[in-house]
Image: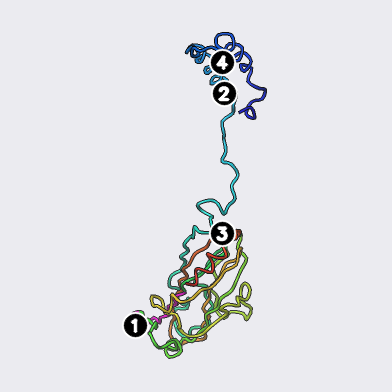
Amino acid sequence: MNRFFSPFNPFDEAAKLASETAWTKDDPTPCPDWIAGLIGRNVRDFIATRVPGFTHIPNQADYESALYHPHAIRYHFQTRGRQIHPSAAAPFAPWRIELARFDVPIGYVGIVRSFGQYLGINTLQGWTVLNTMGNPFADTDAGIPGTWIFRLSPFHGESLPWVSVLNPIPERPGMHYPDMPESGGIWYPAGTAAAQSVRLTVPSGYSLRVFWQSEAATVQPGAAVILKGQIQGAYSSRSLDVTRGQWT
């Protein structure tokens, strides 16, 4: 306990002297209660008035906390909802629309486990959904062929403006995402088993962004994407095993 005292307890020698005067170890009788009480009270009073209380939580590695521990997987769900071509009437110009993001802060690693696609056309009778099981080319058949594009952008906690632009320039936002750069058709219809079959790794400090880029059309398209998965702490030897386990 001496490491807590600065200076050392001034009652130590007084308590020792009182104990030796009133009672010694060779005395067969027990120590009087008033002597034991006096010694104990001096010690308690000194501790209560001189030992500072702890006013902060001791330093702890992030990966050992309940929130950031590699085994504490944090669920991510992100969709922008259905986005409709901004033109009011045909012809409908080529369109690039950003539909969903999966943000991974610095110090984490992300795993996207679900990618759901939705496409529809707006008719006089309402929306016709093109998510037909067994026909990934339903978009082309309906006259709204397009390309799904995955890009990476640095993420430092601030959100970039959402993209929606007509007649887009060839340059695309962000950086190339090698695992799933782009595709055409509806191979992962939202709400189906196929939509749950992806495993996309998102590196620390990046946001995975999903775009749909349509060609010119005579009908008004609408599109949506949903991304689901989790993020977890990256700086631990245990993270690698947990990350690999997400593929099972």
Asked if residue 105 lies left or right of residue 129, the reply is right
Q: CA distance from mark 3 to mark 2?
A: 40 Å
Q: Which amino acid does the dot numbered 4 rest on?
A: Lys
Local crowd size for mark 4, using a 10 Å CA cut-off: few (<14), some (14–19), many (≥20): few
Residue 133 at x, y percent in the picture: 38, 85
Whether 70 is among the magenta residues is no
Q: Position of residue 16 (x, y in %)?
A: 60, 15
Task: From the image, give the main secondary structure of the stretch colored magenta.
Answer: strand
Q: Are marks 2 and 1 in contact (CB under 8 Å)?
A: no
- Give me the C-alpha separation between circle 4 and circle 2: 26 Å
- As shown in the figure, which amino acid type bears the numbered disc 2? Ile
In the rendered image, is residue 17 in sight?
A: yes
Q: Quadrant of residue 18 in the image?
A: top right
Residue 220: give x, y in percent of width and height: 43, 82
> With respect to residue 46, does 167 lie above or below?
below
Q: Please report whichever mark, 4 or 3, sits nearer to the chain's N-terminal start.
A: 4
- Of the residues under marks 2 and 1, which one precedes in the sequence? 2
